[in-house]
Image (cartoon, rainbow, N blue to C red):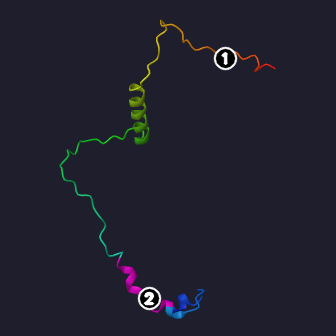
Amino acid sequence: MSVAKFLAGLPSFNENNFSKFHVDSGNRSSSKRPSVYIPTKDYPAEQIIVTEKTSILLKYMQQHWDKKNSTKKREVTPIDQEPSRKRARMDGSRNILD
């Protein structure tokens, strides 16, 4: 198939838009060699790589949750202490049950 036949049905008003098209320009990317991993250390062939069941995101969130909870400024109050001095507001004008 020639370039002219390929471009014949395309909606173009100016044929000069495609005048610099060359078939060889598309082959440059395919001639590149793929990148290959070359290890820098020798690991034993018997080594077994095991993937963890929990994802990295869940681990990250759990670590930050643990840090946040361990460094809380307020600790849970023991049961032996007196109850809070704060009392519920008893306004006569506001009655929830009405």
Which image quadrant: the C terminus? top right
Q: Position of residue 6 (x, y in %)?
A: 53, 87
- 37 in relation to 25, above or below: above
- 8 in relation to 97, above or below: below
Asked if one can make out residue 92 in the rendered structure from this viewpoint, the answer is yes
Q: Is residue 23 left or right of residue 42?
A: right
Q: Is residue 3 magenta?
A: no
Residue 88: image quadrant is top right
Query: Which numbered tag is attached to residue 89?
Result: 1
At x 40%, y 80%, the residue is 26
- 10 in relation to 64, above or below: below
Q: CA distance from mark 2 to mark 1?
A: 82 Å
**Magenta segment range?**
17-28
Task: Tell which residue pokes out farthest to the right in this image.
Answer: 98
Q: Amino acid at mark 2?
A: Phe
- Mark 1 crowd level (few <14, some 14–19, many ≥20, 10 Å Cα): few
Q: Position of residue 71 (x, y in %)?
A: 38, 26
- Mark 2 crowd level (few <14, some 14–19, many ≥20, 10 Å Cα): few
Q: Position of residue 27 (x, y in %)?
A: 37, 80
At x 44%, y 21%, the residue is 74
Please, what secondary structure does the residue beneath circle 1 have? loop
Q: Nearer the viewer, residue 32 or 69?
A: 69
At x 18%, y 50%, the residue is 41
Query: Which numbered tag is attached to residue 21?
Result: 2
Residue 11: image quadrant is bottom right
Please, what secondary structure does the residue beneath circle 2 have? loop
